[in-house]
Amino acid sequence: MPYVNIRITREGATPAQKAELIKGATDLLVRVLGKNPATTVVVIDEVDTDNWGIGGEVVTVLRQRKKAADKG
């Protein structure tokens, strides 16, 4: 029974987009490893950007900095 955990930042992924991720991950396991889709579990965790860090910095801060830089 494959278990796939997808973690994304909580920024408004639509239900349709999440359904596509679930279907795509399931289809990939079926195609590549011959897994049974009926027993393939896919979980999507949405994480607030205040709880996600990259390169030692909080994603919320990184994105705010990028927006400010893009405005010039």
Image (cartoon, rainbow, N blue to C red):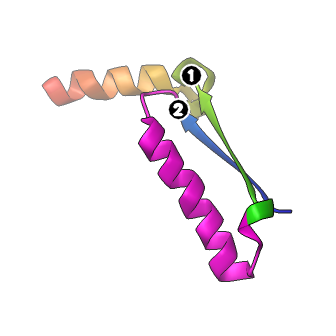
**Segment tinted magenta in the rendering:** 9-37
Disc 2 marks a residue whose amino acid type is Thr
Determine the image quadrant of residue 57.
Answer: top right
Determine the image quadrant of residue 51.
Answer: top right
Please tell me whether mark 2 sits on a helix, a strand or a loop. Answer: strand
Which label belongs to residue 9?
Answer: 2
> Who comes first in sequence, dot 1 or dot 2?
2
Residue positioned 47% across, 37% down in the render: 15
Q: Horizontally, is 25 left or right of 11 in the view?
A: right
Tell me the chief SS of the magenta region. Answer: helix
The foreground one among 18 and 71 is 18
Q: Where's the C terminus, which quadrant?
A: top left
Please tell me whether mark 1 sits on a helix, a strand or a loop. Answer: loop
Q: Which residue is mark 1?
A: 48
> Given contact means CB atoms under 8 Å apart, are the residues at marks 1 and 2 in contact?
yes
For the question of whether residue 72 can be seen, the reply is no
Asked if residue 9 is positioned above or below residue 65 in the image, the reply reads: below
Q: Position of residue 55 (x, y in %)?
A: 56, 37
Disc 1 marks a residue whose amino acid type is Asp
Asked if residue 34 is positioned above or below residue 51 in the image, the reply reads: below
